[in-house]
Image (tube, helix red, strand yellow):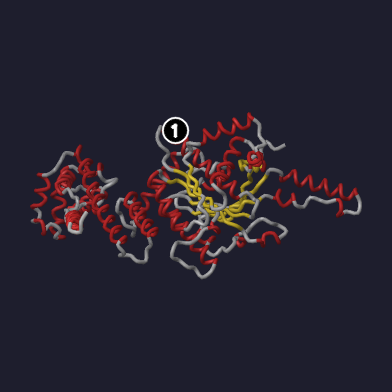
């Protein structure tokens, strides 16, 4: 290519870009008028569009305001036709710009049958989506050229994904005040769903019978803190809950012959995805994880291990093992998963290993943890999913005679207790009692040692394979201690059957 050809080609490309920018944004004014005419003729047409169409979706703002006025009357159980609407339109002057009430006659001549109302509504909604995509695309291009110098490339991707997620999920309805009537409708819908379900679980099951009875399961928008000292089994318990929720979602989908309505996301900042998968396999195949790592298993156990792994491969369970992940990256990945697969539960192991949002520089570790917990609560509310965040406890627990945790033991607590809808502690007395095994060297006679040993064995028998889940705070229900079964060989938690204890 010679020097003369280059500027000509650039000019052509520039003209092409200008041509694109000069295109008329997508709109379907005929569909808008036809739908409004159908609504004014037969209010039942509103039922075919009310679940996805709002006034903001109309390209002509006057058409949008007419739709809003019609919808307002229908929602109140009142008739919305040219006669009843005429006085409102004349008083507001809404139709002055389009020829007054004669515009209503034009809408009636453009009307479609009620059967076609849904198709016309979707055409209006589709044109709105395309207009939003054009706006998003323009912002992406402008930001890439440097309009937002405060955002680097990764931040621009996150910002674009956020706007796309909002477009895909909220139908363009901006946040703001919600009428009490609308809030009551939402509350009644939740109550109806809980009433129609069998058992005591209104939310997503945790796989733990007694926990579900006390809490009603895992509820959307809730932030639950699961805390404990090292070796108490925090990760094992959280994994149990995540696995049980994923299996419940899979079984529900199989019964309805559909895809799972959502997935479970585990952010494992401490363990790799392979380690976490091995732990789940060990529990389900009942093959010791320690023996798996050493290769100390027979052919029959290995075959069982492989068979169970195939059964679990289709679970809607996703693991992200990025170390020290930032709150911004976590939010972006949750939004992406919600958009592509659906999202029903988020588990974070654990929050002290997270970093706050990109660009923030908190003055202290306490403030940093507070920002992280506030961010996790924001994710729970935005995506309407329960978020379980694991947390470490301070060492002051070890200095007490009774080592059961308390709220004050939360490490760098800050606003952890304040932001959480529930705070629970996992505690195993067996772990601490094991460390107090009598030693013969500490006694001046074997008889005294034998007495102490027998007393220790008696206490060990009482707490063997038992754990406590201490529900210290629950914003929407009672607190208390839930007894659990814990099998150390497979790091497995389950329901404790106290009725058949011997």
Please determine whether, in this image, residue 500 is positioned above or below residue 110.
above
Judge by depth and name the residue closer to the eye, 316 or 405: 316
Judge whether 352 appears above or below 192 on screen: below
- Which residue position holds label 1? 254
What residue sits 86% from the left and 51% below the top?
440
Q: Position of residue 484 (x, y in %)?
A: 63, 44
Q: Quadrant of the N terminus?
A: bottom left
- The percent position of residue 291, horizontal first and vertical second, equals 66, 39
Determine whether, in the image, residue 64 is placed left or right of residue 500.
Answer: left
Q: Is residue 103 visible?
A: yes
Percent x, y of residue 117? 20, 41
Residue lying at 70% horizontally and 57% vertically, measured from the top left: 402
Asked whether the viewer can see residue 60, the reply is no
Which image quarter is the C terminus in?
top right
Residue 314 percent coordinates (x, y): 47, 36
Q: Is residue 501 left or right of residue 375?
A: right
Determine whether, in the image, residue 161 is placed left or right of residue 246.
left
């Amino acid at each position: 290519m010679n020097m003369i050809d280059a500027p000509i080609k650039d000019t052509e490309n520039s003209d092409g870009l200008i041509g694109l920018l000069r295109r008329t944004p997508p709109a379907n004014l005929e569909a808008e008028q036809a739908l409004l005419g159908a609504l004014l003729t037969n209010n039942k047409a509103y039922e075919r569009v009310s679940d996805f169409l709002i006034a903001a979706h109309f390209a002509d703002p006057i058409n949008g305001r007419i739709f809003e006025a019609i919808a307002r009357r229908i929602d109140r159980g009142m008739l919305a036709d040219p006669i009843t609407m005429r006085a409102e339109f004349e008083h507001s002057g809404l139709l002055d710009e389009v020829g007054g009430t004669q515009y209503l006659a034009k809408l009636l001549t453009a009307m479609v049958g009620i059967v076609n109302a849904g198709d016309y509504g979707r055409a209006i909604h589709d044109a709105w989506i395309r207009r939003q995509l054009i706006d998003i695309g323009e912002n992406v291009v402008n930001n890439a050229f440097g309009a937002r110098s405060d955002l680097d490339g990764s931040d621009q991707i996150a910002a674009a994904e956020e706007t796309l997620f909002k477009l895909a999920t909220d139908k363009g309805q901006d946040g703001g005040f919600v009428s009490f009537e609308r809030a009551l409708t939402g509350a009644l819908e939740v109550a109806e769903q809980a009433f129609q379900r069998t058992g005591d679980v209104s939310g997503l099951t945790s796989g733990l019978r007694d926990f579900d009875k006390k809490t009603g399961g895992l509820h959307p928008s809730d932030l639950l803190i699961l805390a404990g000292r090292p070796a108490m089994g925090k990760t094992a318990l959280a994994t149990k809950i995540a696995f049980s929720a994923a299996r419940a979602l899979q079984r529900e989908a199989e019964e309805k012959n559909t895809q799972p309505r959502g997935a479970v996301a585990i952010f494992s900042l401490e363990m790799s995805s392979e380690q976490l998968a091995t732990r789940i396999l060990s529990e389900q195949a009942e093959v010791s994880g320690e023996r798996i790592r050493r290769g100390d298993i027979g052919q029959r156990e290995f075959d069982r291990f492989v068979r169970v792994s195939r059964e679990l491969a289709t679970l809607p369970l996703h693991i992200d093992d990025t170390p020290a992940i930032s709150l911004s990256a976590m939010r972006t990945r949750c939004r992406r998963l919600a958009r592509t697969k659906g999202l029903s539960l988020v588990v974070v192991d654990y929050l002290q290993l997270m970093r706050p949002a990109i660009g923030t520089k908190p003055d202290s570790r306490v403030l940093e943890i507070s920002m992280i917990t506030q961010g996790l609560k924001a994710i729970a509310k935005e995506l309407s999913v329960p978020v379980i965040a694991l947390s470490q406890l301070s060492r002051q627990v070890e200095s007490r005679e009774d080592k059961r945790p308390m709220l004050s033991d939360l490490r760098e607590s800050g606003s952890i207790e304040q932001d959480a809808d529930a705070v629970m502690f996992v505690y195993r007395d067996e772990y601490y009692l094991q460390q107090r095994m009598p030693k013969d060297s500490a006694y001046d006679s074997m008889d005294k040692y034998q007495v102490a040993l027998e007393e220790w064995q008696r206490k060990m028998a009482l707490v063997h394979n038992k754990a406590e889940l201490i529900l210290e705070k629950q914003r929407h229900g009672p607190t208390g201690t839930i007894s659990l079964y814990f099998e150390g060989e497979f790091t497995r938690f389950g329901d404790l059957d106290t009725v058949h204890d011997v």
